[in-house]
Image: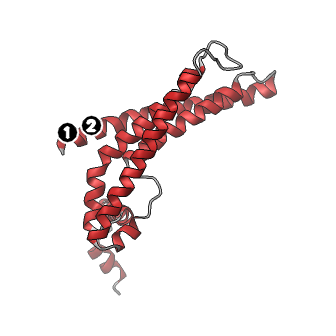
Amino acid sequence: MGTLNRISRILERLLEIITVVLMVSLTLVVLYAVVTRYAWRTPSWYDEVAAIMLVWLTYYAGALAALKRGHIGVDGVLAAMPVKFRMPVAYLSEALVIGFFAVLCWAGLVVIEVMQGMALITLRWVPLSFTQSVIPIGAALFIIAQLLSMPAHLAKVRSGRTQEEEEIRHAIAEAERDNARAGFTADALTKRDLP
């Protein structure tokens, strides 16, 4: 598991950097357009570039969320099932997600092929095949993220633990650490309340 965790951490860091760069860039483009709207004239390329950047941000952030298993799920339904049903349903669920993104990756490659020779309307030097490359790249990253996070996820499913329970345990442990640093131990709080 050490190698898998190391690869997962590297991918997580890479996706975090890409997501932050895209978010900051999108913010700057939108701010630039707002300022220029009132100062002189909004650039013609703003709408097209902002829309593409938002799509890119969605794909890369989606892959990051998949790596962290942060997408909406219904772990409670799985946890309530007997193990003999729980695990096949979990495997089927993983296969469906990976299958969907494999089809999306393939469709993205078809889109890139169709877009060959075309360019953005406002920035004629930017090829559409470049802007649409996020579809297969994002889908492939999502598949990789899903595969990297799958062993830990399946172990949780097998044990009957849910993502929500893990988050609650983590939050409680973090709060107890913060309270201990601040001197708010259970004993100190109990003594303070006594007459």
Amino acid bearing label 2:
Ile
The answer to whether the residues at label 1 and label 2 have Cβ atoms under 8 Å apart is yes
Quarter of the view holding residue 11:
top left
Question: Is residue 185 shown left or right of residue 49?
Answer: left
Helix, strand or loop at label 1? It is helix
Q: Give residue 121's position: percent from left, percent from top.
A: 71, 20
Crowdedness near tag 1: few (<14), some (14–19) or many (≥20) residues, C-alpha within 10 Å: few
Residue at horizontal 45 percent and vertical 37 percent from the top? 139
Judge whether 190 appears above or below 174 on screen: below
- The residue indicated by pointer 2 is 7
Judge whether 147 appears above or below 137 on screen: below
Residue at horizontal 30 percent and vertical 60 percent from the top? 177
Q: How far apart, in angstroms, are the residues tagged by discs 1 and 2?
A: 6 Å
**Image colouring:** secondary structure
Total marks drawn?
2
Helix, strand or loop at label 2? It is helix
Quarter of the view holding residue 173:
bottom left
Q: Give residue 7's position: percent from left, percent from top.
A: 27, 37
Q: Give residue 124's position: percent from left, percent from top.
A: 67, 14
Judge whether 92 appears above or below 111 on screen: below
Q: Residue furthest top?
A: 125
Amino acid bearing label 1:
Thr
- The residue indicated by pointer 1 is 3
Instruction: Name the residue nearer the viewer: 129 or 74.
Output: 129
